[in-house]
Amino acid sequence: PGRGGGRGPAAAAAAQKVCGGAGAGAGAGAGARAMVKALILVGGFGTRLRPLTLSVPKPLVDFANRPMVVHQIAALKAAGCSEVVLAVNYQPERMMAFLESWAEKLGVKITCSREHEPMGTAGPLALAREVLDDGSGDPFFVLNSDVVCEYPFKELLEHHKAKGGECTIMVTKVDDPTRYGVVVMDGEGRVERFVEKPKTFVGDKINAGLYILNPSVLSRIELRPTSIEREVFPKVAADGRLFAMTLPGFWMDIGQPGDYLVGLRLYLESVRRKSPTELAAGEGIEGNVLVHPSATVGAGCVIGPDVSIGEGCVVGDGVRLRSCTLFKGTVVGAHSFVEGSILGWESKIGAWNRVENLTILGEDVATKPELLLNGAVVLPHKEVKESVSQPKIIL
């Protein structure tokens, strides 16, 4: 998550803060003082997750039967966060509608800070300065919207307070650090420097895209497109005030389809460890499977491992599902096989289809019976009438 940059200082002039909100969590009502706030960076266009993001902004794409960002907001609420700011650039109207439908359910006050031009990963903090710095001196969380993990926000807050730094970033261990920007720290967890794609070993911890910052950091950020990873954190590290905490458990950036499915597998493994009763069980279920209570599964099906079946889905008789996700309202015809694929909202798979090799169906895609879809990427509202034997995009 070393995202950032922007299109120059002129973008700041076009940025406008539009705050609206709904919902109130425990301690966030009239006269109550919020102990901690959070800003979630949701401004990207989500190009790597197209065609799903042609229908909704990336943070609202389903993941394990809830929008991605809902997992994060629920975890923040559990850690005592009572107000969340969504830094929005793409499809702001959709995000505002999200406020209305989810804020009360989650019990958290949600506001939007709107950018009319991309502001990178630090600019949104300056744009939302008045909300994040309420004069209390309390730190606030900052996170990227496409990161999934077990979200140990309570532990991160405690670690931050114990170290007494200005910022604390979550880091995660990777097997091949040469692919990433590596965080180099001392024995006390104080960050010394960042090394981009090192050719020789300097460490195996990378930025996990989850941070907690003191309000004083806001004085380091100008109201312009800028990167918190490339421009702000190195300066805080140079002052000896940036610390790192190693993330326990799994981590994945699910901003592209292959990683999305890996993230789903890791998430379901975590559910198995922590809340196994949330997973499906019984005849025909193999491994970790999540089935929405409103979904129906026909006779003679074999489901799993690593499958998520969404709200209102209908799975016909004799279907085989493996390492895939079905978004809300999807129908899979009898005796079809789906593996390693993502089926978008309200899609309808004909009988005796074979869908595999990272096939991604946008919203409301229909396929005729007896087709092969091998690595097909299908834009929303299309009908597929012929087999796709080699990976391609269907416009």
Image (cartoon, helix red, strand yellow):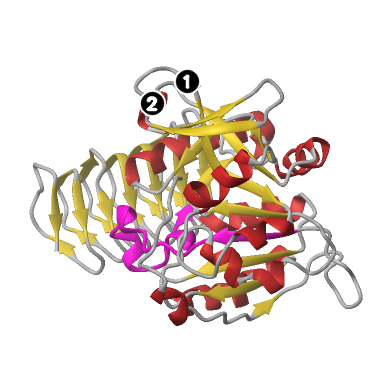
Q: Is residue 34 left or right of residue 89?
A: right
Q: Secondary structure at mark 2?
A: loop
Crowding near pointer 1: few (<14 within 10 Å), some, many (20+)? Answer: some
Q: Circles 2 and 1: CB distance less than 8 Å?
A: yes
- Residue at 35% x, 49% y is 316
What residue is shown with label 2?
Answer: 198
Where in the figure is residue 182, as x and y percent of width and height?
Answer: 47, 30
- Residue at 59% x, 67% y is 126
Examine the image and state in which quarter residue 390 appears.
top left
Examine the image and state in which quarter residue 96 appears.
bottom right
Where in the figure is residue 348, as x and y percent of width and height?
Answer: 29, 59
Q: Quadrant of the C terminus?
A: bottom left
Number of disc labels? 2
What residue is shown with label 1?
Answer: 202
Crowding near pointer 2: few (<14 within 10 Å), some, many (20+)? Answer: some
Q: Is 202 colored magenta in this rendering?
A: no
Query: At label 2, which amino acid type do we have?
Result: Pro
Chain part drawn in magenta:
37-63
Where in the figure is residue 324, as x and y percent of width and height?
Answer: 37, 41
Q: Is residue 178 left or right of residue 26?
A: left
